[in-house]
Amino acid sequence: MKVLVTTRSGRELIKGGLNLTDSASVADLQDAIHKRTKKFYPSRQRLTLPLPPGSKQRPTVLNYKKNLKEYTDGNTDELTVVFKDLGTQVNYSTLFFFEYLGPLLLYPVFYYYYPVYNFFGYKGERATIHPAQTYALYYWCFHYFKRIMETFFVHRFSHATSPLSNVFRNCAYYWTFGAWIAYYVNHPLYTPVSDLQMKIGFAFGVLCQVSNFYCHILLRNLRSSEGGGYQIPRGFLFNVVTCANYTTEIYQWLGFNVATQTVAGYVFMAVAAAIMTNWALAKHRRLKKLFDGKDGRPRYPRRWVILPPFL
């Protein structure tokens, strides 16, 4: 089989194309491209089928697990694919590790190293550390330590790599919010909430953190089951909402904010909720499209996308 590899501008990436066996897979094609170009290793490649001129449809992305014959419409002699360079890639575990490491290290600096506030113009003495500030430190560090451990030992990623630029973007997001929240919660002039509110907030938040961990275990088991591909998440809160992992994530920050009561914390929760809601809506639409009850497939159950109805 001859495979012509072109760029989106129509230029041939590899002059004369590539000659592969009829049993070659998309992964074999990616390896062959890498051997000829060196720079474009497989995870950096995005291969699609060409679209007719003027078409506004989304191109079909080639799945690395499939055989090239599946994309030839019966013509096994020649196939044209369109190549896109995704840029320098990093493992998702690397991306998540660095974005979570920042908040984990920055927050204790504001708690333990009082002189840091001198850099922000505060010249007064440090008052007694409130229990709310201490519990907030434990809660915060537990959360991000948990996220790092989940990254390496729990999560199974649908994509192996992510663009390097996402490391800088995500680190800017997490590190900035981490420092902003830590600054206000640990400030010498911080005014804590009542003991009852603090206990309710942290207790609720810890419950949600544990629930969030359990949701991740359920998702891990879903990905590890035979057959692969998209499957309907079931069990626990997934029987109520599509993305129970996002629901518990939002609620655990709600608990933290009830216990600490800062504008920075609520802004972080609102931004995170908006981002996760967008992801959840996309996943909900995808699952409904895949499991619509046609051809004997199970119908995707009616359920809330991210938050249960009592909110």
Image: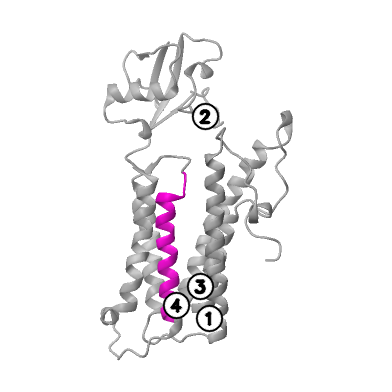
Q: Earlier in the sequence, mark 4 or mark 2?
A: 2
- With respect to residue 167, does 101 lie above or below? below
In the image, what residue type sits under mark 3? Phe
Q: Nearer the viewer, residue 91 or 146?
A: 146
Q: Nearer the viewer, residue 261 or 229?
A: 229
Q: Earlier in the sequence, mark 3 or mark 4?
A: 4
Residue at the disc numbered 4: 135
Contact check, label 3 and label 4, Cβ < 8 Å: no
Image disc number at residue 286: none
Contact check, label 1 and label 2, Cβ < 8 Å: no
Range of magenta residues: 133-156
Circle 1 or circle 2, nearest the eye: 1
Residue at the disc numbered 3: 256
Q: Is residue 13 visible?
A: no
In the image, what residue type sits under mark 2? Pro
Using a 10 Å C-alpha cutoff, classify the residue at mark 3 as few (fewer than 14 neighbours), some (14 to 19) or many (20 or more).
Answer: many
Circle 3 or circle 2, nearest the eye: 3
